[in-house]
Amino acid sequence: MQLTQAHRDALHDILRWRRDVRHFLPDPIAPDVLGRLRAAMDMAPSVGNARPWRVMQVETPGLRTEIIANFEAANAKAAGIYDDAKRSRYNALKLAGLREAPVHLAIFTETDPDAGHGLGRQSMPEMLTYSTVAAIYTLWLAARAENIGVGWVSILDADAVARTLGAPDHWRLTGYLCLGTAAQDDDTPLLHRNDWQENTPTDWQVV
């Protein structure tokens, strides 16, 4: 298949308008859309074709309440590393949409999957986690193409999340995602708009 300028333009738009969403509308995501996002993950690359990602869709209200409490405790702890002025700016940021997002996905990495037969991960076992990250990003771009926003919540005690959800011991949390319709579209990252951190160019060296 020969891809065209139209494909390149569409991909550029998806990349440009992909945002880490923190403000969601409560509208549910249709099951067929979630099905297409799951199918997109199925096409993600992975080391040795091990496909080590494991997804839990968290719908039980009590479990969500525990995750939110986990975030709030981790967020308060994270704020403590800053001086007073920076802490005030940090606390003003909205860093998760856990309460509003209609869909929560906890995405784990299987640390020793049978699939793949160990290919490609003997010297770099972290490739399993990298594979899960690639699957998450595949889901993220596919979601944007469906006009669905994604927020990646990293301010969490990952081990506590695993315990809350009853994940097997050999699963490690790689990403906790909020999905839903974004309350607003913006091609400028939230942290840019709040003067926290601008993009820096990719360090690309020829050696």
Image: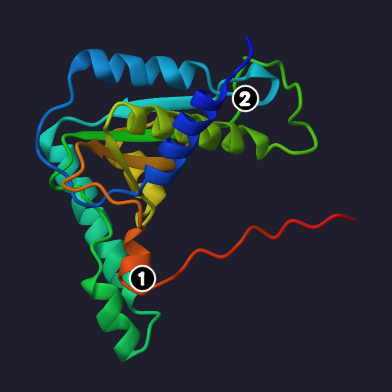
Instruction: From this view, report whether residue 75 is shown above or below residue 30.
Output: below
Camera-side mark, 1 or 2: 2
- Outermost front residue: 5
The way the protein has been coloured in the rendering is rainbow
- Asked whether 180 or 154 is in front, the reply is 180
Instruction: From this view, report whether residue 75 is shown above or below residue 104.
Output: below
User: In the rendered structure, which amino acid carries the disc numbered 2?
Assistant: Ser
For the point 9% across and 38% down, which residue is it? 26
What is the number of callouts on the image? 2
For disc 2, the marked residue is 46
User: What kind of element bears circle 2?
Assistant: loop
- Asked whether 163 or 68 is in front, the reply is 68
Q: CA distance from mark 1 to mark 2?
A: 32 Å
For the point 52% across and 17% down, which residue is it? 43
For the point 64% across and 17% down, which residue is it? 49
- Asked whether 17 or 170 is in front, the reply is 17
Quadrant of the rendered structure where residue 76 is? bottom left
Q: How many other residues sit within 10 Å of disc 1, few (<14), some (14-19) or many (≥20)?
A: some
User: In the rendered structure, which amino acid carries the disc numbered 1?
Assistant: Ala
Quadrant of the rendered structure where residue 101 is? top left
For disc 1, the marked residue is 78
- On the image, the x and y values in percent for residue 106 come to 34, 35
For the point 33% across and 40% down, which residue is it? 177
Instruction: From this view, report whether residue 102 is shown above or below residue 47.
Output: below
